Amino acid sequence: MKPDILLLEPMMPEIEKQLDAAYNVHRPTAGEPLDKIAGSIRGIATGGGTGVPRAIMDSLPHLEIIAINGIGTDAVDLNEARRRGIHVTTTPGVLTDDVADMAMGLLLALLRGLPAADRYVRDGAWGHTPAPPLGHRVSGRRLGILGMGHVGQAVATRASAFAMPVSYTDRCDKALPGYTFVPELLALARDSDVLVVAASGGAGSRHLVNRQVLDALGPDGVLINVARGSVVDEAALVAALAQGTLGGAGLDVFEHEPDVPEGLRTSPRTVLQPHRASATVETRLAMGRLVIGNLAAHFAGRPLLSPVA
């Protein structure tokens, strides 16, 4: 008899097909009342942004595993999962390169003014109206990284190819050759032209990038966020961009997704993406396969492939 699982966030069609073959997959978004199936649910497949709302977790008395299609765990109550003996898995490693690529893509698009130049050509304005403002050089700019985990280190590797001096801050000095550890975020921002946010989300990192940090970056500095929107004080960011005290921001994540403040959407100083740093066919398939592998291992009584709790 196939176990019953809950799918809280859509996945690649190929992955969902495999889930349907192995499990009785329930999709609450399709209108199925959760209270009628709650007693039978043993597993959840979800995304890092969606996680598992606490009310849903509390309503599932026989929940055994939460398989997250992503690396973020801030939307899952890990303490409650541990208390109840619920396993939690993520998909580390497989999305690192794509997220780092997105960080560099946002940086290039922002500093070189690629979106405005693209519109200039598409609108037929080339040769008829003044060209967009000059962009800014990327190569050689001082890069600061908040959070030097897998993604942060992958960003640093790419930045080195642009001859960018790299400094970082984290909970401790990781003694990484070629990169400078700076204990204080404010000092890192003050000494950086670009600050890339690659830190984990959650209560401990909420609003780490506040108005003081943005002011330290200054009117020529830019912020790139491919981590979690909660790490940045979004209201302070909107104000800094509007007042010109920050040069620009390239954002893949936001504090209250999918709601994006008008001040970010209309600012000429921003380049925005809808939380899709890992959104390549190759990576989403690899992530989905790891979700499937973790679920299969759990229900077969084998060691989990990538456990968090």
Image (cartoon, rainbow, N blue to C red):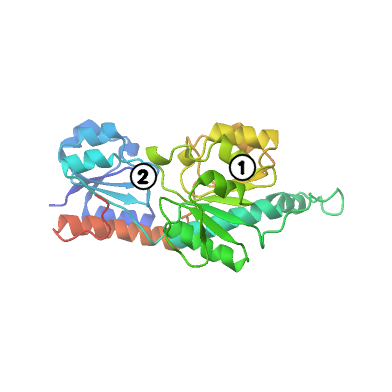
> Measuring 36% from the left and 45% from the top, which residue is drawn there?
9
**Residue type of the residue flagged with mark 1:** Ala
Task: Decide which of tag 2 and tag 1 comes sooner along the chain.
Answer: 2
Which residue in the protein does label 1 denote? 216
Disc 2 element = loop
Where in the figure is residue 40, as x and y percent of width and height?
16, 40
Q: Is residue 260 visible from the viewing direction of this image? A: no
Where in the figure is residue 306, as x and y percent of width and height?
28, 58
Q: Does residue 106 sit above or below 157 in this rendering? A: above
Q: Residue 234 vs residue 52: left or right? A: right
**Residue type of the residue flagged with mark 2:** Glu
Mark 1 is surrounded, within 10 Å at the Cα level, by few (under 14), some (14 to 19) or many (20 or more) other residues, namely many
Which residue in the protein does label 2 denote? 9
Q: Residue 223 vs residue 93: left or right? A: right
Q: Nearer the viewer, residue 86 or 294?
A: 86
Q: Nearer the viewer, residue 165 or 256?
A: 165
Q: Is residue 87 visible from the viewing direction of this image? A: yes
Where in the figure is residue 60, as x and y percent of width and height?
19, 36
Q: Does residue 123 sit above or below 155 in this rendering? A: above
